[in-house]
Image (tube, grey):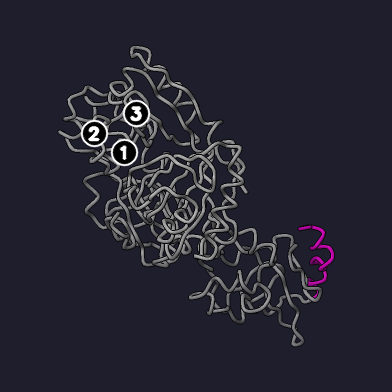
Amino acid sequence: MVDFAGWYMPVQYRSILEEHKAVRRAAGLFDVSHMGEVDVRGPEAGRFLNHLVTNDVGRLFPGRVLYSPMCYPTGGVVDDLLVYLRGPEDYFLCINAGNIDKDLAWIRGQAARFNVVVTDRSPDYAQLAVQGPKAPAIVQALTSVRLDLVEYYHFTEGTVAGVPCLISRTGYTGEDGFELYHPAAEARRLADAVLAAGVPYGLELAGLGARDSLRLEAGYPLYGHEITAEISPLTAGLGWTVKLDKGVDFIGRAALASEKAAGSAKKIVFFKTGDRRIVRSGSPVLGPEGEVGRVVSGTLSPILNEAIGSALVDANAAAEPLAVDIRGAKIALQIVRPPFVPLKKL
Amino acid sequence: MSNVPPDLKYAKSHEWLKLESDGTATVGITDYAQNSLGDITFVQLPKVGAAFKAGEAFGVVESVKAASDLYAPVAGTVLAVNGALDGAPEKVNQSPFDEGWMLKLQLAAPAAVGALLSADDYAKLVG
């Protein structure tokens, strides 16, 4: 158990490696109640959010989910989040636990000029993520909502095991699955129901350790690692989330447009090593002429059985042979485009 | 509760030592240590013939969470290392006192073993 953004959370229930493999093979149940939730409502809610985030909120329709960074004017990232459109003036955000206070202050500061009401709902909601190829069957066993009609990055509202939920077909593992937002007081009841329904399918409880190794194997960014106040979405390879041409002058647009025009000075690359020694976050990355960057995430891929990770490196060094030093051994980095493992097209 | 076999000696740094009848010793890490580390992903062991002082780092054990040094409980020279851990470091999790052994040592001074913790004392330390 560890302290994580003020929450007392399990790194693992049984084994990070086994929990990871269970999610890829069958399913895992993650308690992600630490995540923050925010309501943004009012006549200008959509216009405000399109100013706030880099992706195009104008593309949303009720029942659709959007992933987006939220940037500073510098192009650095305040946080990355999910935007849900529930109704014409009714949006719901899911933000990172460690950023809740900072995000709320930022969002409220930016909202002052708009006719919107921003409400922190984090204490009201618990969230369970059911992830893995068996997740649809497991959740379907607990609800009369037709889950086959809820496509990836869409959501609906209904009851699961009698608990009212926002049922979101999203996740942070690269697998199919659902994130279930529900009243905090019902979390235990819902978790027990999912566990009971899931165990016959091979579902296991999964902790923060597996959550991190699964997201890295899928090539998803983690705030504070691949994206930070200093690492823009373009630098992080998230150009698809930056809609410079959406017709709105969003926060960070000018800086991101310049970065795009000039080319990013640094970039996030993903690597594997063919070796089991984990390349730890913070390790210097060495090019032929010396240090060219730092590792920002590193773990052992339980599926590939070798070290995988990501690094922030000088853009002009990214195509050169890169290596790290682990206790005196020089380990070559093989640059790869994630995901590291074949994932079902969602 | 951790398993603490009564016939072994222990270091505060969570290695165990088994004194063999021929005066050599086998060394590994305890059940408590493997459980604290979590999934062990890599074990780096010294070459046969390497000599270590008591308390000197002889290798590294890596888990998903962290890399930790391994310390010689007593002074000695390495007679053998467990090569099976190269391909199967998880043996340290599964069988820390048996298949997960790490070193066989020729002891520099067998009497030094007396200074290590007994099973009872180690059990109190990790209790």
- Residue A156's place in the image compared with B101, above or below, is above
Amino acid found under the numbered disc labelled 2? Arg
Of circles 3 and 2, the one toward us is 3
* Pointer 2 or 1: first along the chain: 2
Q: Spatial distance from mark 2 to mark 1, Cα to Cα? A: 9 Å
Q: CA distance from mark 3 to mark 1?
A: 10 Å
Q: Secondary structure at mark 2?
A: helix
Instruction: Write down the region rendered in magenta.
Output: B111-127
Q: Which of pointers 3 and 1 indicates the residue nearer the eye?
A: 3
Instruction: Tell me, for residue A87, which label it has, or none.
Output: 3
Mark 3–mark 2 distance (CA, rounded to whole Å): 13 Å
Residue located beneath label 2 in the image: A59
Mark 2 vs mark 1: tell me if same chain: yes
Mark 1 lies on residue = A64
State yes or no: discs 2 and 1 in contact (Cβ < 8 Å).
yes
Dot 1: what SS?
A: loop
